[in-house]
Image (spheres, rainbow, N blue to C red):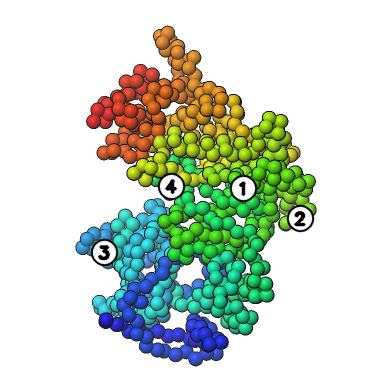
Amino acid sequence: MKKKTIAIAIASTVVSGTLITLPNVFANDMTSINQESQVMDEALESIRIQTFNYLSADELVNYDDVYKVPMENIKSITNNGGQYASSKITLAIDGDKSTHWETGKPNTDTFKNHFIVEFEEIEMINRLVYTVRQSGATGKGFPLQFEIYTSLTEDGDDFTLVGSAQTAQNNNAIEIKFQPTEFKRLKFVFVEAHNSWASAAELAFYSEDVLSDVINNVFVDGTHTQLAEEYQSLEKINEIEQLLVGHPLKDRYQKVIENARAIYENPDVFKNDLMITASQRGDASVEAREHQIPRTSYSLDSFGRYITPGETIEVYVDADEDGIYPKLVMGQIADDKNGWIRTYDLKPGYNQITAQEFDEMSPAILYVYNPALESQQAYAPIVRLVGGTDFPIYRHGETTPEEYEAALLAYMEKVSFDDEDFANGVRDDVYYNVTELVSENNTISTTAAGAIAAINEMNKTGYSVYDTMEQKEYVWQEVQRISGFDDEDENPSHHIFNQKFTTRVFTKGAFGWSASGYVGFNGGNTERRDTSHFKQIVLPFAPNLGWGYYHEWGHSINNSTIEHLEVTNNIYSAILHKHFGDGDRADWNYIYKRFSNEEISHGYFTYLAILLQLEYYYEDAYANASRIARENPDGVLNGLSSSLERLVVAYSIANGVDLTDFFEDWNYVSATDVMKEKVAH
């Protein structure tokens, strides 16, 4: 087999018989040696890719000072495809992620975009950090398949392959890691680019940081609860600590050493810490787009703990390093400040996160959000949390109603009704007024006082929180059916929209609202926060109690292509309201006036009555129309001027009858020739 030679400069030291390779920055008192390394083609082509999000802004500055090739060491950057408009190639190395380079020529079977970076001197590099364009068409030009070449000369076509790889679309920065290699020129070929137009917001080049790799191998996995066999000695741990001197991530790695010592002294010290396995339901925004969902919902896995403003927590993550990483979410309820949600990127291993101060946020519930499907990760991430304060949480199917009520009553003895009590750090003498009810597909976030008020009411009627969450699960399933979703369908766009319903109660806002990622309700602002929706959200559905819930989730999940705002979402409300013992609220009396030759003017509930006629006459009329909207067979919905026109055409095709005259007769929408032609064909 043909072999290739690459000159590799390393600094090394032997620690208890183990060779640990260190970057040159630590080689002041060590001997630097040059050696020729024979590397087979297969090794050269081995590339590892991961999201580059594991450093804070301050850490990145210090880290770049040591490992990043400085901008002044880059002599030039050129490309072979020109530029689109003003998006020139030098914008890829201007240090500004808000700008980007875009080629002026797309990839074809005979042309592949590439760029070439020439350095002032030969550089030893083993990582390229690529940031996808962030403005405009985010993600356009991402290298789905690429090759990296090296040349030790200033010109000529004498490039040698370093490695090649394929990867999934990623809208963040990615770290492309390969064997430490010398470069005078680096050539990057876009074998396949997203949308065929190669692009980049920013490029950065780094030398090898082997110490970080060593640190990452101290534990069996990223939860840092068990030492790897190689490091189950105090001598080993001490030797690694000595190597931290001068490293830009010393403070971060010092915590790793502390954990290692603690485990050495007591192997079970962390094994009872709170850990959850993240669900794998995909990226909420991507799933919504693929299912034509207008507002989506976040699938949040609750720790059953809240964080106090200014509090610092530790989060340890065991995740597929080549997959998508989970995120930590802080979610406020009641008197939220500056928006209810805070999201933090997590990396495998140790993460330290500090909540904002009290003037910026209220106490918040801690969650894991994993924006990945099972196919996008080798295994589901496991996340260990150190910090925060436990609150009562009902986990449907695990907690009994009696256990939940007892936990709430004990918790309420120390609940504070004054948020100012949490302005100056963690308190162990008072608790924040919060609780949650969680089932397979639902997360309900409200106050502990509101939940107790609801339970006291349910105790008089024989109901419990078990019944409440059974009903919430029924609603989730029924909403899928009304939308025409079915996991048995061959078309993935018709598969169930598998996001949890996240419902939260606040002290302000409209009666209820559907927003990106959640549904919110106004529970009023009484002292105890135990009335209105703070209580009602915990009660089972009943006649005249539930329409708002169905209505808002209808907003979130009705089909965006054929959406009639405040009308199609009420199809969900009408069907569910009837199921739980009340009418569909359509304005039938007003509709009947038409048969007496009276003129009628439409409101939301007369429009609803028109659609419900179809729902009652044709089986699953709206579900079938939604399926047509998602399929858009032969582009039949293209070229129509409004969602109402698309609604009429979709209903007609789905139910096998021309309904254009029906809708026009009811003065719902004027039937155009284009609409009639599309239905006819």
Pointer 3 residue: 112
Mark 1 and mark 2 in contact? Answer it, CB < 8 Å.
no
Task: Give the mark toward the camera: 4 or 3.
Answer: 4
Q: Callout 1, which amino acid?
A: Glu
* Residue 565 percent location from the top left of the image: 46, 31
Badge 1 crowding class, 10 Å Cα cut-off, few under 14, some 14 to 19, many 20 or more, is few
Residue 517 relative to residue 119: left or right: right
> Reading the chain from its start, which is encountered first: label 4 or label 2?
4
> Can residue 322 be seen here?
yes
> Reading the chain from its start, which is encountered first: label 1 or label 3?
3
Pointer 1 residue: 398
Q: Is residue 123 above or below residue 362?
A: below
- Mark 2 lies on a secondary structure that is loop
Badge 4 crowding class, 10 Å Cα cut-off, few under 14, some 14 to 19, many 20 or more, is many
- Res 287 label: 4
- Res 428 label: 2
